[in-house]
């Protein structure tokens, strides 16, 4: 039965939203994170969950860095990165934390609907470090195993403000395994120029065709084959998409969006590649993250490079991405519907 209920998960306010096909848990009290997205027919949830869950954030109330705070508060799942993304960065007198303020803010439920076609909730918060109001909408389709995730930013201040946005879904075990594979209409990969780590399959600052030649990035490595990667995907069609197939669970995770809104996607992999905090050679996860710009070095660097977006007073920027968790036998139909919805979907780039 479709609908939603208010609850608490990991010590924070949460919503559980259900359609005929999917169940989604949203952490209203922690960034409006989409913690889980379960296919009700199979019980499969492709989203990664952190090893420490909610425990680390309650163990300490202060942290030595915003990176440490980010990891301590991260239970896993899918975050909204805004108005900054990636590294901590300074803009004027403001130090934007790792991955931005929006993913740690407290959101309130402002609207909901339960119709025959879909169930929808809307959450809202106002940020402190920038004059942005953030609206987050989650809508589950009752006809297909598809979720629409919206982001709306409005400049409530009297001055122009700048921002960047990335949608940050992370996939993990048991959905991910060496039998899994990544498929996308991206054509170009560019490795991050500063990501120098022992187990990266490619050197920093390289540009090549997807999925690469020396190492096939469409393939997921064995657990005993450590790999780390930070790169950026581009060259998408007008409707960008990717699909991760999981024969072990007989399911796939797909995502589609309009390239006008998110022209690139950050691509991060951590397959037992780092012996350091917080991975400790025991993390198996990957993320492909639609983004307004690259690299993921924070808002200050985006402004310096001239790739940050700009909102005038009272102006809004809106986006939507569509995702699905479905059985492999449904891939052709569901991915076709996903791309069609993204093509005509909600979202407008009113920002300069």
Image (cartoon, rainbow, N blue to C red):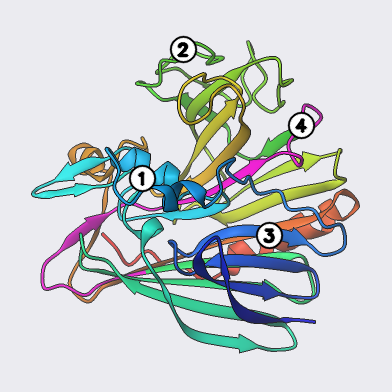
The circle on residue 203 is 2
Counting residues from the N terminus, which is met first, the one under dot 4 or under dot 1?
Answer: 1
Residue at label 4?
177
How many numbered marks does the figure carry? 4
Q: Does 200 appear above or below 23?
A: above
Determine whether, in the image, residue 26 is placed left or right of residue 293. right
Residue 144 visible at all:
yes
Give the extent of the magenta segment: 153-180
* CB under 8 Å between discs 3 and 4: no
Residue at x 80%, y 82% (from the top left corner): 1
Residue at label 1?
69
Q: Position of residue 218 (x, y in %)?
A: 69, 28
Residue at x 46%, y 76% (from the top left corner): 123
Give the class, few, some or many, for how many residues have Cα within 10 Å of label 1's Cα (few <14, many ≥20): some
- Name which quarter of the figure residue 174 lies in: top right
Question: Mark 4, mark 2: which one is toward the viewer?
Answer: 4
Counting residues from the N terminus, which is met first, the one under dot 3 or under dot 1?
Answer: 3
Give the class, few, some or many, for how many residues have Cα within 10 Å of label 3's Cα (few <14, many ≥20): many
Q: CA distance from mark 4 to mark 1?
A: 29 Å
Residue at label 3?
37
């Amino acid at each position: 039965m479709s609908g939603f209920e208010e609850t608490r998960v990991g010590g924070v306010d949460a919503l559980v939203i259900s359609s005929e096909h999917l169940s989604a848990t949203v952490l209203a009290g922690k960034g409006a994170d989409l913690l889980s997205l379960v296919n009700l027919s199979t019980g499969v949830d492709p989203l990664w969950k952190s090893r420490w869950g909610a425990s680390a954030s309650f163990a300490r109330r202060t942290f030595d860095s915003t990176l440490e705070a980010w990891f301590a508060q991260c239970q896993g799942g899918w975050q909204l990165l805004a108005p900054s993304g990636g590294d901590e960065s300074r803009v004027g007198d403001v130090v934007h934390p790792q991955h931005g303020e929006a993913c740690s803010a407290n959101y309130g439920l402002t609207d909901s609907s339960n119709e025959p076609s879909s169930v929808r909730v809307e959450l809202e918060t106002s940020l402190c470090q920038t004059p942005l109001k953030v609206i987050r909408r989650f809508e589950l389709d009752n006809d297909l195993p598809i979720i629409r995730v919206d982001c709306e930013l409005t400049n409530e201040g009297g001055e122009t403000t700048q921002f960047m946005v990335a949608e940050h879904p992370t996939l993990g075990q048991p959905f991910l395994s060496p039998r899994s594979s990544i498929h996308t209409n991206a054509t170009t990969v560019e490795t991050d120029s500063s990501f120098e780590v022992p187990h990266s399959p490619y050197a920093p600052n390289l540009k090549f065709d997807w999925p690469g030649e020396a190492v096939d990035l469409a393939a997921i490595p064995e657990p005993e084959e450590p790999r780390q990667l930070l790169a950026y995907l581009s060259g998408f069609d007008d409707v960008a998409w990717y699909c991760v197939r999981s024969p072990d669970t007989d399911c796939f995770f797909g995502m589609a969006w309009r390239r006008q809104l998110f022209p690139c996607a950050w691509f991060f992999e951590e397959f037992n590649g780092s012996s350091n905090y917080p991975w400790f050679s025991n993390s198996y996860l990957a993320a492909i993250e639609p983004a307004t710009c690259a690299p993921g070095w924070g808002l200050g660097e985006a402004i310096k490079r001239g790739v940050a977006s700009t909102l005038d007073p009272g102006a809004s920027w809106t986006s939507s991405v569509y995702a699905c968790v479905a059985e492999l036998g449904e891939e052709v139909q569901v991915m076709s519907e996903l791309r069609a919805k993204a093509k005509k979907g909600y979202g407008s780039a009113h920002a300069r």
